[in-house]
Image: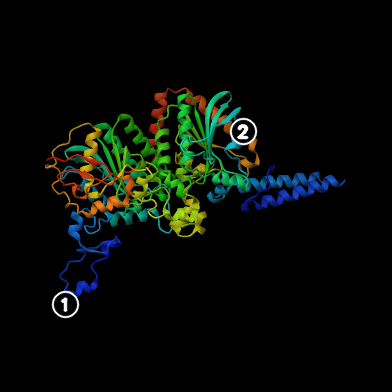
């Protein structure tokens, strides 16, 4: 089952069984001894173990899967889901932000605009991608591409995966707040369908800045939060050690957010998370996107915008 | 409120032979220039230190009633309160934090919205109460702001917002993040209808509010020396691990970097906003004699220095200090270097 050896701490029982099976396999292929029965038994045990661990994950554990270093990133999904993809660069004012990418693509032949946060795998790429934390020019590039999509009447698909917008000196100088605010303002009224999917980490305003749309979907083990559990713990508990507690209080999981009506759909992931079977996950996400696009296309622009507005207005619970 | 408790130094207070004939809380110390100030006078001066022009915090309700014409105000949705959907609990429960804040401030939540007139013209105005959980935006703040915007839309009148906030309210988790999208969408609707929105950023305005309704004004205005930014300076310091440039994230810094249109002294706010809104709606400005009778005391000369000093000199045109002030006969100039015409009665 495993494409990856990178196990999280709570997955240790799974890791141990996995290692044992590998060992037996290598011994079995060297020897004439038939270990198939033994292996089959262990594999069954592995299945049971995995299912039991994953049937009862805490919010904190889910946040770890959401940030797993092997988790598919935007570019992985783009490669697996689209027939064509032409990356477009730059905000036309200052720079090309590599933490937020986008470009023209075809989904089952249909032109779409794709926008997504991008984290890096290796150290050098992580730095180039700024760990997936965009600066104002990233958000302004995203806006430029989205407005281009509107001009050419093509739907916008966004993929969210960021710890948050970058809190740096330059980012403040160039108006991080304004860049995020402007996207929220414009996305509320763009005249084309917008589908947003949280694929990994949905970190606060930095996530929401490409997260306003007609449909908001979440991968099963992704997270979406107003503040990172660590940040919340250090402010409210005055100690980052309470991150686990903060994660559960913040209700950051797809299941909780679906129940609260803040997202529309949860895309199931295989046991162990998206990185255990990338092609399966890409396939189910693609199917969901195609289905949603087909149904959104049936609406007139006015209907689309009105429904989007009503949806935004409905957020929030209060008493009078 | 700690500055309010900082009363006159005890050695001065006991000068009257130990007799306590000075009522409690009648003296306030400016936390900038340390001058001891007479509280009623400070209030008359809109909580701006008459000695050094330091802008101290002002209560949201006072802000609005002093900004709008006297006896013109009517509060919108005064009874709206938060619901603890998540049963959030850190060291204290959200519920108890809420009731504590309500007791301490006398307000139901962190945003007050009102209709009223400004120099006779109807407007909607709202102000964040920073003392209420750091002016944080949850569902109530988002909804009240949105309704204020809808009121402005329905009646075709301008919206003005005074922000003072740390950002989204953590205890309402993602629901509070969504208020950023909600309020921004309402402002987009106003923009489509050509209804003016003026955002006044006061000390401090950061996080989710700055990254939504705060920065979306047709005109963005800062109060002098206010801290305005996306991330708080402490967070940035942790990330970049170096000392932050002087004046970083102040109104003056934002003006220099093009994020706000101007910096206005609190005591000029009424008059300048009225003038701006009249231009935006292409209407003549009414006589200012019948305007708010309780206009604050005149601006001392030093005000001009403060606001002008704050901005690098190349950004300002020539300013004539004597001709500045809401009550000056010849017109006024401000930190942005622009001047408005004479205010004829």
In what quadrant of the picture does the C terminus of chain A appear?
Answer: top left
Residue depicted at x 19% and y 63%: B26
Q: Nearer the viewer, residue B176 or B135?
A: B135
Indicate the position of residue A300 as horizontal and vertical percent values.
42, 22
Distance between the alpha carbons at the discs numbered 2 and 1: 84 Å
Indicate the position of residue B307 as horizontal and vertical percent values.
28, 50
What crowding class fits label 2: few (fewer than 14 Cα within 10 Å), some (14-19), or many (20 or more)? few
Q: Which residue is mark 1?
A: B17
Q: Is residue B132 visible?
A: yes
Q: Which residue is mark 2?
A: A79
Q: Nearer the viewer, residue A166 or B275?
A: B275
Q: Nearer the viewer, residue A33 or B269?
A: B269
Q: Secondary structure at mark 1?
A: loop
**A238 displayed left or right of B269:** right
**Residue under disc 2 on the same chain as residue under disc 1:** no
Q: Secondary structure at mark 2?
A: helix
**B68 displayed left or right of A1:** left
In what quadrant of the picture does the N terminus of chain A appear?
Answer: top right
Furthest toward the bottom, the residue is B17
Residue depicted at x 25% and y 58%: B52
Q: Is residue B74 visible?
A: no
The chain letter for the residue carrying disc 1 is B
Q: How many marks?
A: 2
The chain letter for the residue carrying disc 2 is A
Q: How is the image coloured?
A: rainbow
Residue depicted at x 47% and y 22%: A298
Quadrant of the image occupied by residue B123:
top left
Indicate the position of residue A276 as horizontal and vertical percent values.
65, 42
Q: Nearer the viewer, residue B317 or A32?
A: B317
What crowding class fits label 1: few (fewer than 14 Cα within 10 Å), some (14-19), or many (20 or more)? few
């Amino acid at each position: 089952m495993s494409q990856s050896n990178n196990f999280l701490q709570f997955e240790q029982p799974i890791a141990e069984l996995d290692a044992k099976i590998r060992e037996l396999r290598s011994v079995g292929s060297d020897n004439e001894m038939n270990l198939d029965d033994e292996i089959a038994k262990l594999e069954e045990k592995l299945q049971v173990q995995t299912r039991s661990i994953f049937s009862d994950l805490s919010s904190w554990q889910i946040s770890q899967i959401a940030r797993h270093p092997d988790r598919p990133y935007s570019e992985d999904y783009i490669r697996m889901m689209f027939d064509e993809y032409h990356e477009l660069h730059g905000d036309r004012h200052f720079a090309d932000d590599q933490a937020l990418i986008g470009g023209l693509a075809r989904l089952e032949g249909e032109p779409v605009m794709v926008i997504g946060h991008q984290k890096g795998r290796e150290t050098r790429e992580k730095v180039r991608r700024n760990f997936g934390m965009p600066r104002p020019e990233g958000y302004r590039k995203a806006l430029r591409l989205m407005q281009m999509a509107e001009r050419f009447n093509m739907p916008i698909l966004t993929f969210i995966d960021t710890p948050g917008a970058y809190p740096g000196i330059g980012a403040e100088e160039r108006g991080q707040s304004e860049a995020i605010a402007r996207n929220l303002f414009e996305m509320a009224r763009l005249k084309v369908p917008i589908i947003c999917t949280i694929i990994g980490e949905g970190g606060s305003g930095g996530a929401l800045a490409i997260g306003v749309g007609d449909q908001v979907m979440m991968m099963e083990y992704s997270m979406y939060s107003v503040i990172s559990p660590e940040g919340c713990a250090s402010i409210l508990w005055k100690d980052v050690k309470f991150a686990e507690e903060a994660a559960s209080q913040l209700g950051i999981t797809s299941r909780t957010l679906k129940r609260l009506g803040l997202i529309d759909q949860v895309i199931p992931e295989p046991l162990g998370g998206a990185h255990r079977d990338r092609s399966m996950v890409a396939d189910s996400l693609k199917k969901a996107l195609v289905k949603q696009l087909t149904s959104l296309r049936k609406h007139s622009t006015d209907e689309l915008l009105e429904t989007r507005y009503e949806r935004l207005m409905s957020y929030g619970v209060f008493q009078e | 409120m700690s500055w309010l408790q900082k009363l006159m130094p005890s050695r001065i207070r006991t000068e009257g032979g130990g007799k306590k004939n000075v009522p409690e809380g009648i003296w306030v110390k400016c936390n900038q220039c340390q001058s001891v100030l007479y509280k009623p006078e400070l209030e008359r001066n809109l909580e701006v230190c008459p000695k050094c022009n330091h802008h101290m915090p002002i209560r949201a309700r006072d802000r609005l009633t002093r900004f709008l014409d006297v006896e013109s105000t009517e509060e919108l949705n005064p009874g709206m309160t938060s619901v603890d959907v998540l049963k959030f609990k850190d060291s204290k429960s959200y519920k108890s934090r809420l009731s504590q804040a309500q007791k301490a401030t006398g307000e139901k939540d962190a945003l007050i919205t009102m209709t009223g007139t400004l120099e006779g013209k109807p407007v909607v105005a709202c102000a964040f109460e920073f003392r209420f959980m750091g002016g944080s935006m949850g569902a109530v703040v988002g909804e009240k702001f949105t309704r204020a915007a809808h009121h402005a839309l329905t009646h075709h009148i301008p919206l003005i917002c005074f922000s003072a906030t740390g950002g989204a309210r953590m205890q309402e988790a993602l629901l509070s993040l969504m208020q950023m999208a909600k309020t921004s969408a309402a402002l987009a609707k106003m923009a489509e209808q050509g209804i003016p929105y003026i955002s006044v950023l006061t000390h401090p305005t950061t996080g989710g509010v700055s990254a939504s309704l705060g920065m979306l004004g047709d005109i963005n205005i800062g109060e002098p020396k206010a801290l305005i930014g996306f991330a708080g300076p402490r967070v940035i310091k942790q990330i970049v691990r170096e000392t932050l440039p002087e004046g970083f994230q102040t109104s003056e810094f934002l003006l220099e970097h093009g994020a706000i249109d101007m910096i206005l002294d609190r005591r000029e706010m009424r008059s300048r906003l009225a003038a701006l809104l009249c231009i935006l709606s292409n209407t003549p400005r009414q006589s200012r004699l019948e305007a708010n009778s309780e206009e604050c005391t005149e601006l001392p000369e030093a005000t001009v220095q403060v606001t002008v000093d704050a901005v690098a000199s190349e950004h300002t045109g020539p300013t004539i200090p004597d001709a500045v002030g809401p009550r000056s006969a010849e017109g006024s100039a401000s930190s942005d270097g622009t001047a408005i015409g004479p205010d004829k009665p």
